[in-house]
Image (tube, rainbow, N blue to C red):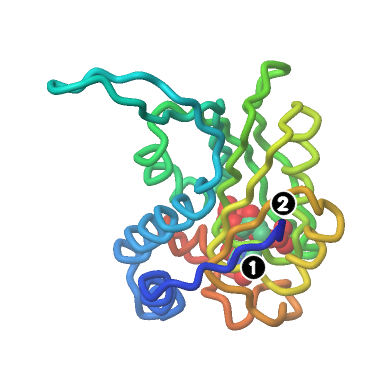
Amino acid sequence: MKSVTILNHPLAADHLARLRDQSTNPHEFRTTVARMAMLLGVYATEDLPQRDVLVQTPLAETTCQTLAAAVSIVPVLRAGLGMVEPLLQLIPNASVWHLGLYRNEETAEPVEYYDKLPLEGASDVALVLDPMLATGGSIDLVVRRLQRWGVADIRVLSIIAAQPGIDRVVRDFPEVKVYVAAVDPTLNEQSFIVPGLGDAGDRIFDTPSHG
Ligand SMILES: O=P(O)(O)OC[C@H]1O[C@H](OP(=O)(O)OP(=O)(O)O)[C@H](O)[C@@H]1O
Ligand SMILES: O=c1cc[nH]c(=O)[nH]1
Ligand SMILES: [Mg+2]
């Protein structure tokens, strides 16, 4: 079973073009992130466990399938917040656990500042939401935290990954599934993805950095 899925879909390509475009304003950027998250969510959930249930329609009894897994949504603050609502639209019964990380601007190492995960009672499946997977340092930290919590099935939903970062995640966590709309070739000296789309958090929340 391959661990990386790259969305090959005309709608994903169209949304990605809008996200990459530096002239896309924050409102359109936010709504496009949400649409892309919806597509990623569909791909990332296509093999969730199901159970048969008997349902009585107005005409007859029939066998249907419902979800048989407890699913949690784990947005990585800040940028991952932009992907929460569409995932909740798809999985209304999912619980949402927030993790807050930012990258140290000098070292690009992730710094943890918020952790809302409970001590026990891990879900069966965790869908990690973060639009950007650059060096992979943030996802490394998140996956370790979710494994400590006890989640067996971890799935990362990112809009763009950099090749070095996704290689790192696949090498260190071959059991983790990653769903992306694009894999870009490189990182620049500040560990930004090139061509990428810039700073996703700043573009979602209209908080231009002063770097
Ligand atoms: O793979 P990495 O090298 O760890 O980089 C990816 C991380 O960087 C960005 O967050 P950022 O630090 O900009 O925080 P923000 O979401 O608050 O803007 C992004 O949303 C990821 O969390
Ligand atoms: O290119 C990048 C790298 C990390 N975080 C972003 O938002 N963009
Ligand atoms: Mg940011």
Instruction: State the count of labels.
Output: 2
User: How far across and how far down the image is residue 210, in percent?
Assistant: 56, 68
Q: Relative to residue 1, is residue 58 depicted above or below?
A: above
Res 91 quadrant in image: top left
Decide which of 171, 120 is in the foreground and name it.
171
Question: What residue is shown with label 1?
Answer: 161
Whichever of labels 1 and 2 marks the residue nearer the N terminus, that label is: 2
The residue drawn where x is 82% and y is 63% is 168
Q: Which mark is residue 59?
A: none
Q: Residue at x 40, y 37 (%)?
A: 88
List the residue tagged with mark 2.
Answer: 139
Q: Report how far apart the C-alphas of labels 1 and 2 lie in the structure.
A: 11 Å
Residue 120 is situated, as x and y percent measured from the top left of the image, at 71, 16
Residue at image point 72% right, 51% down:
139
Q: Secondary structure at mark 1?
A: strand
Q: Is mark 1 within 8 Å of ligand 1?
A: no
Q: Residue 50 in the image: state x and y as whole percent.
A: 51, 32
Q: Quadrant of the N terminus?
A: bottom right
Check disc 1 and give the amino acid type.
Answer: Ala
Q: Residue at x 35, y 75 (%)?
A: 24
154 sits to left or right of 108: left
- Beta carbon of the mark 2 residue lies under 8 A of ligand 1: yes
Looking at the rendering, in which quadrant would you find the C terminus? Answer: bottom right
Circle 1 packing at 10 Å, graded few (<14), some (14-19), many (20+), is many
